[in-house]
Image: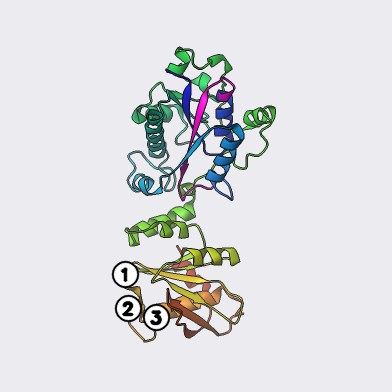
Amino acid sequence: MNKRAVALLSGGLDSTLAIKLMLEQGIEVHALNFLTVFCTCTSKGCTHQATKVAEEFKVPIKVMNITKEYMEIVKNPKYPRGRNMNPCIDCRIFTFKKAKDFMEEIKASFVITGEVIGQRPMSQRKQAIMTIEKESGLQGLIVRPLSAKFFELTIPEKEGIVDRNRLLDIHGRRRNQQMALAKKFSINDYPCPAGGCLLTDKGFSARLKDLLKYKPDYNISDLHLLKIGRHFRISDSLKFIVGRDSKENEKIMNLSEKDDFIFDILDIPSAIGLARSSEANPSMLLGVGSVSFAQKDIELMASILARYSDSDGKSVIVSYCVLPEQNWENIPAISANKDFLDTIRI
């Protein structure tokens, strides 16, 4: 067994401290960061913070985008979810298996994590931690510097690679000890001590369930759109997304794709609306430039957009087009009724 280890680095305080404690013991650390669309750690993203930590500590880092593979775990977890769409135990098993593969690839001997026993209700109970360790194939090879004293000796400890006396006994959800340790090590920039995951959010989970139900052949753009705007289920094959502010309007435009419909009100301040269909040919469905059986859907979306504009309840002209064309059509609209919108809002 050598002194090379793979450290799971989210960019949060706990994983940052775990790496620092191992570096203090002369361990050669290789950081591993996982990127998905669900991370909420920082405004600039977990990967940005993890890379910053790795650069500060002068350790190499590998960033893995696992969204596509991870979605299979989200859809079909083996273990119970949390309160929403979060498959926390399955998630940890999945990421530890990835860490094991990377460990073998670089010929490292063990894995380091910032886990703190009792900190998270699903995945950081001792029984769950032991289940995760067993199923990942890393029994005895996961060193948890912050909570090591609550676990049996790991193989690196038994072989003298890691000094157990220099490991800690932190537990629970309070982070006073971690913050004190950060101060000791002059670690001042840790914007997400606890990290975060959108799958634990009730509203986001509702949107994800809706997407999986009505568009099982979703793409990465569909997943990113779940994070922004107001979402309305117009029909089984049609969803309408309305920006909340100028930044979200810009994001909606950046995530738009061929065959999406863009709605705008050109003469007064308003939100941007994006209509996305799960039909193979949405322009035929909506009948641009002619009245079709779905003309009512265009009228409904125009009225929704009018609701989120400075129309003051007056009739406005809503313009819309199908991308990538720029042949705008116009339709008059009056703000939709709020109570009705509540019935179709996702």
Q: Which residues are magenta?
A: 23-40
Residue marked by disc 3: 296
| Coordinates of residue 135 in the picture (x, y in percent) | 34, 30
First along the sequence among labels 2 and 1 = 1
Instruction: Find the distance from the CA under tag 2 to the CA under tag 1.
Output: 9 Å
- Mark 3 and mark 2 in contact? Answer it, CB < 8 Å: no
- Of tags 3 and 2, the one toward the viewer is 2
- Mark 1 and mark 3 in contact? Answer it, CB < 8 Å: no
Instruction: Find the distance from the CA under tag 1 to the CA under tag 3.
Output: 17 Å
What's the residue type where badge 3 is placed?
Lys
What's the residue type where badge 1 is placed?
Glu
**Is 25 contained in the magenta span?**
yes
Residue occupying image coordinates x 57% and y 24%: 23
Image quarter hosting the N terminus:
top left
- Mark 2 and mark 1 in contact? Answer it, CB < 8 Å: yes
> In the rendering, which numbered label is found on residue 279?
1
Residue 154 visible: no
What's the residue type where badge 2 is placed?
Met
Quadrant for residue 82, please give it. top left
Q: In this rendering, would 258 be left or right of 319?
A: left
**Is 224 contained in the magenta span?**
no
Residue marked by disc 2: 284
Image quarter hosting the C terminus:
bottom left
| Coordinates of residue 100 in the picture (x, y in percent) | 38, 30
